[in-house]
Image (spheres, grey):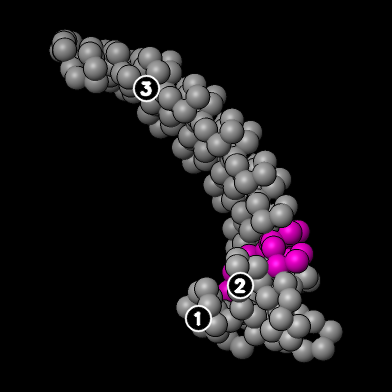
Amino acid sequence: MKRILPLLTLILTTAQANLEATYRNNLLINPDTNQPFTGNLDIINNDWGKDAVEFNKDYVDGILHGYEKVYYQLGELKSLGHFNQGKVDGMVELYYEDGSIQAQVNFDNGIRQGRAVSYYPDGSKQLEQVFNNDVLDGLHRTWYENGKVMKSIPYSKGLVHGMVTTYYESGRVFEEVTYEYGKPKLMKVYNEDGTLADIKGFLDKKVIERFKQ
């Protein structure tokens, strides 16, 4: 069998029987008909036990088209996504084993587009990004588990541009770095009481001046 991950066996779910599958010219082939497969496909992980499904996918004419589901070993849904002619399209969702949402990423014809968000197990935000044509473009933010912002990074067409701010877990500012299209220009570091601890200036990403407070 070609292009099958180790310890995984492809099983075609048909009305007649479960058949081993193979690929030809990047198309999934049903060996019973020797034609590109159309239907629902279970991928069994033999390490998990007999008939333990790890992936479930929809195919049309040998190409991923429809839903793809990934499962944890005990059967809980791990991720859910949709494919359009072999390319992921729409919202992809990842789940914790208890069923709560872990992450959401939007795709448009195989590329990330719009917001991507990940969550802590309690449902609070952990990370938020904005993509435009698969490139970071907008505000990237991360959070501590207590809900306070950890870091804020502005992106413009894939480059850091603007003020990058890092926070203490208390919510006070720890560091501010000014960027111009990917190049750092000025950094300020603060003590947790808010007093200034350090300043650095940059030229072509190299420190050119430093003042101790």
Residue found at x 43% / y 15%: 162
The residue under label 1 is which amino acid type?
Answer: Leu
Element type at mark 2: strand
In the foreground, 4 or 143: 4
Element type at mark 3: loop
Q: Which mark is residue 163?
A: none
Element type at mark 1: loop
Q: Please check the rendered image and state whether residue 212 is part of the magenta-colored stretch, yes or no.
A: no
Q: Please check the rendered image and state whether residue 66 is part of the magenta-colored stretch, yes or no.
A: yes
Q: Give the CA separation, mark 2 to mark 3.
A: 44 Å
- Which circle, 2 or 1, is nearer the viewer? 2
Question: Which span is picked out in magenta?
Answer: 58-76
Q: Where does the N terminus fall, quadrant-wise? A: bottom right
Residue 74 location (% of width, % of height): 61, 75
Q: Which mark is residue 7?
A: 1
Callout 1: 10 Å neighbours few (<14), some, many (20+)? Answer: few
Number of on-image labels? 3
Residue found at x 40% / y 18%: 181
In the foreground, 109 or 116: 109
Q: Which mark is residue 182?
A: 3
What is the quadrant of residue 33 in the picture? bottom right
Residue annotated with mark 2:
24
Which badge, 2 or 3, is on the more N-terminal residue?
2
Residue 24 to residue 19: above or below: above
**Seen in the image, is 154 located left or right of residue 121?**
left
The residue under label 2 is which amino acid type?
Answer: Arg
Which badge, 2 or 1, is on the more N-terminal residue?
1
